Amino acid sequence: MSLSLLRGYRPELPAASRAACEVLEDVGIEVKRLQDTPRGEVLTVELLANRGDHHCYLGLARELGGRFEAPTVLPPLAPLATSDAPAPLVTTDTCLAFGVARVDLADADPARLPEEWAEALALNGEHTGLLAVDAGNVTGREIGQPVHVYDADLLSGPLRVRLSEEGETAVLLDADEPVVLPAGLTVVADDEGVVAVAGVIGARRAAVTDSTRALLVESALFDPAAVRRAARALARQTAAATRFERGADPALSAAGAARTVALLDAWGALADGPRTWSEAVCPPDARLAPREILLDIDALDTYYAVDFDPAVVERRLTCLGFTVRKADEADEAGSAGGRALRVGVPGHRLWDVFNPECLYEEIGRMWSFDSFPAILPEAGGGAAPTPRQRARTALEQVLVGYGFFEVVTDGFYSRTAHERLGVSADSPLTRHVELRNAIDRNFSLLKNNALLQALDIADYNQRRSLTLGKYFEFTHLFEAVGAEDHLELPVLWGMVWGEETYGAWQRGGQGFDFWYVKGVLEELAHACGTRFEFRRTADDPSPLTELMHPTRSVHVYADGRRVGLCGEVHPSVTANWKLRTDRVLYFELDWTALLAERAPEGAEQVDELPEHPLLRRDVAFHLPAGLTAGEVRTAMEAVSPLELAWIRVTDLYERDEVRAHTFELAFQNDNTVTADQVNHAMSTLTSHVLATFGERGVYQR
């Protein structure tokens, strides 16, 4: 764009070019380059993506006018009389406004185009050397309304705006051969066929030439989506399409033609004769209806942490083209002592201004965002984590700490895939919730178990030469109930296989067994403040029982209720996947059974941080096989002379016959507990453990 032309519309710009660029950037028009050329100073600017009104000098001048509190007015328009000729006909709702002006040219001498506009059009490749065409291009570049000109003598009958038909063709202005138009594009046509693709490009049949004397000037408004669709279908991104697909100003439909005629008249190119305007009747469109937004100045003050003067807000919005009036008493904020405004949205902003927040942005740019204080908005602390969220986080931390990776599997599989499990005919796993209209029959069954996909993951990784697998997933299973109903069950499952190589000097290459998985589950329960029981048999066995090793798997109970199972997958099942590993260990839990509290979520309270730090001590005992850390923990909890926050195992050392468990004890601290009291408590607990379990081989390390 030409900086000197822009100054003509906005003389308030600073005299220094760099300062002018800074003002443009401060209102949101990024200047990519400033060049000093033989044509004068030229700016390359990056416009806001959704602002069609920025694609012209008047639009940028209006934007700057809001900063300078200087109104922007349209340049002179030619008076046009109502035409007696038949009006154009619109038969599609993709045309929102359409009219044509008719004038006669005295001559089409391209020298009549002012040099500054010839150079300005050349900057964007729009200078054609045809005076009438260049006049339309000047109108588009000047006020932002695309216009198209026709040689009226080459048209047959009145213009019609309609949708293209299947197989219809047109020789477009930039083509030498007919182009097949996709059906359903918005086109302008006469009795003989298409003369333009609406809002995108014209056709050669009615194109203006040096000999044109009867001129028809089309000025319209087309649906942005229809123009975008046509431009993509034809692979042509013209200046008109760029503006129309961002939403043009309905108020400029007639003004575009009147400005083009005024330019030709000012350049001395028009012959004496009638200058008429004929406008089509278009289907109504709710998007073009007048719109007002209630702007609460008090809310605006809070938003930017600045006290705004309503009078200044009114002036600057008015200079941007908005209409502003004080809110009535009947309005929801009208009684705020003149601190509420009713803001009418102008035609060029109907496509992007819908609510007060849009006005906040306009005001922010007009004042400069850099002028506002840099403070954080007030915000609440947010809701406390629910018991469900806290339990899931605790479980994830334990599993990730053990080296498990979280995976995500499909919620569906096929009947063929499920048959690989080899379940018996009367197994509950044969019943599924099935999609009646599945697009892909390979994903028609909602999964009623997670083992199938867990084994698929093991197979996938082993075929890629991995020797270790540790993964888990929070998912849902679907249990069929009768013919029409089902239960949705929350499940946490995990699987391990292969050999784990430790990064320590002690040992490496240890395989996994049932006891490893049992230890992981005990740690999961402990992290959620509960404990598991493990039973070999169950009155109500899990549907997966027949797929597990009969002597190396157990059911898992919490609070007397079966919540899952764990153990080694039956070798006959893993054989169906041809897994290259001795053992595959698997667990599946209803993890919601681990919620520490089952009160309504709204009753959950945030744990308060202690005023004084907990008093922590460590003690290590050798525990022989058959004695669990849980038994030792229970014994210490029963006799502690000080209140305990927790006791947990933090380390396990095994070498030869030594199995040393390190327990961390955390005592509550009210700032009155002395070191001597803590030492006495530790001595009491240690003595009790040795007295209770000493005969079984327990000793302190």
Image (spheres, rainbow, N blue to C red):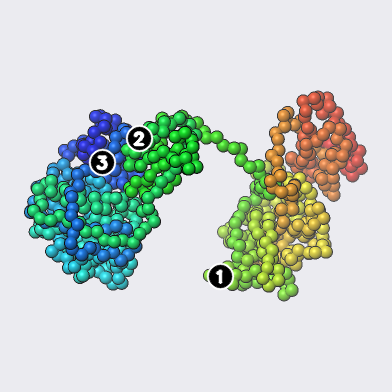
Image-based side of 458 in relation to 193, left or right: right
Residue 108 shows in the view: no
Q: Position of residue 492 (x, y in %)?
A: 68, 55
Q: For mark 2, give the secondary structure.
A: helix
Of label 1 and label 3, which has the lower sequence position?
3
In this rendering, is residue 204 above or below 613?
Answer: below
Image-based side of 461 in relation to 238, left or right: right
Kindly identify which residue carries mark 2.
Answer: 315
Q: Quadrant of residue 611?
A: top right
Amino acid carrying mark 2 in the image: Arg
Determine crowd level at label 3: few under 14, some 14-19, many 20+ residues with C-alpha closer than 10 A.
Answer: few
**Picture residue at 32% right of the left edge, 58% below the top:** 96
Q: Position of residue 284 (x, y in %)?
A: 35, 59
Identify the image quadrant of the C terminus.
Answer: top right
Q: For mark 1, give the secondary structure.
A: loop
For marks 2 and 1, give the CA distance.
Answer: 60 Å
Q: Which residue is at the front of the view, 407 or 662?
A: 407
For marks 1 and 3, give the CA distance.
Answer: 61 Å
Of label 3 and label 2, which has the lower sequence position?
3
Identify the image quadrant of the N terminus.
Answer: top left
Q: Quadrant of residue 166?
A: bottom left
**Picture residue at 84% right of the left edge, 45% below the top:** 631
Q: Position of residue 325 (x, y in %)?
A: 39, 39
The mark total stands at 3
For marks 3 and 2, give the CA distance.
Answer: 15 Å
Amino acid carrying mark 1 in the image: Ala
Kindly identify which residue carries mark 1.
Answer: 438
Kindly identify which residue carries mark 3.
Answer: 73
Image-based side of 359 in relation to 411, left or right: left
Q: For mark 3, give the secondary structure.
A: loop
